Image (cartoon, rainbow, N blue to C red):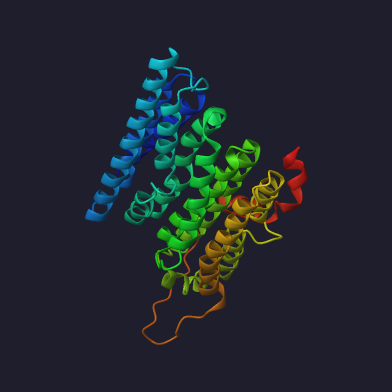
Amino acid sequence: MSPQIFIILLSSLATGTIITLTSHHWLMAWIGLELNTLAMIPIISTTHNPRATEAATKYFLAQASASAMILFSSMINAWQTGTWDITNLSSEPSHILLTMALAMKLGLVPMHFWLPEVLQGSTMTTALIIVTWQKLAPMALIYLTINNLSTMILILLGLMSSIIGGWGGLNQTQTRKIMAFSSIAHLGWMITVSSIMINIMIMNLIIYLIMTTALFYSLILSKSKTIQDTTTAWTLSPTLTTMMMILLLSLGGLPPLTGFMPKWLILEELVIQNLIPAATTLAVSALLSLFFYLRLAYTTTLTLSPNTIQTKFKWRFKLKPAMFFMAAFSTISILLLPLTPLMLM
């Protein structure tokens, strides 16, 4: 793909998200989501192989279905209430349709099946865009309509997502599929707390975006597409593998790293609201996710692959110039926990 076309597609992607973020009218929000989807499809299918084409098709079908449901939901609401305002969603069928549509957009259980397959069929950079930037527009719609959505449905979706996200990643060997199930689990935590305290959801989203971007940068630089690839990443840069291990532990939510902060605050808020079973379920599901993070950390840093004559090691080329962002995101992903009181103000 030529740089000019790629820049146009990225600009369309950003424009679609910004239109959705700034809209008050349902049609404008829908146009932003459609622009976002249509810009993403050529980016997924840049590599000309059947797997990428399949991933682009699955992505299109899932996102188009969700967009149609959002449009249908807003039309029912406009028909019953006479207004297209996003914040004025008072029709019961509209609530349910919108919740299901946004769950499909985000890849929440039980509408999560497209996410691991799409990530596996796309490049690492495209996978990074799908699990970070593409979550912003649906999350903005949840933020705008949260007062009208059903708390019970959101908590159930969140709990199921955190369990399936942890469970699904246990037997995966591909790093992109592991990151897909990690994304499902993290979004489950966010959706669970969204109807109780929206500020914690936004903080969790920001921290998730930063941590995921930092880890994807590490995977892209070390060209680690499978768990087996991570065993030889130390030949490229021992510092990078150490950073990857700490980032994985942070994603798992271990103190004293940044990833512990959102989990701690969400569990605390659920206990305050007397939702003890939900808090227990989330805490147990975090252990499932922690297992595959620890397995990745173990293969990356604590093991040496067999050093036979046939073993292929990575060449230690000069690293790419995008290291500034990785250094900034990695630092934030590791050292932000002491700033928790400041972020809660």
Q: Is residue 161 above or below residue 139?
A: below
Question: In the rendered image, which quarter contains the N terminus?
Answer: top left
Q: From this viewpoint, which residue is outermost toward the bottom? A: 308
Q: Is residue 22 above or below residue 303?
A: above
Q: Nearer the viewer, residue 286 or 308?
A: 286
| Residue 102 drawn at (x, y percent) | 43, 37
Residue sitting at 56 percent across and 73 percent down? Answer: 301
Please say whether residue 314 is visible from this viewpoint.
no
Q: Is residue 93 above or below residue 159?
A: above
Q: Is residue 327 left or right of residue 54?
A: right
Q: Residue 66's image quarter?
A: top left
Q: Is residue 196 left or right of residue 179?
A: right
Residue sitting at 40 percent across and 36 percent down? Answer: 101
Q: Nearer the viewer, residue 186 or 308?
A: 186
Q: Nearer the viewer, residue 163 or 46?
A: 163
Q: From this viewpoint, which residue is outermost toward the left? A: 50
How many numbered marks have been drawn onto this rendered protein structure?
Answer: 0
| Residue 51 drawn at (x, y percent) | 26, 55
Question: In the rendered image, which quarter contains the C terminus?
Answer: top right
Residue sitting at 72 percent across and 52 percent down? Answer: 337
Q: Is residue 341 above or below residue 138?
A: below
| Residue 285 drawn at (x, y percent) | 55, 59
| Residue 186 drawn at (x, y percent) | 53, 51
Please say whether residue 26 is visible from this viewpoint.
yes
Residue sitting at 43 percent across and 49 percent down? Answer: 109
Q: From this viewpoint, which residue is outermost toward the top? A: 82
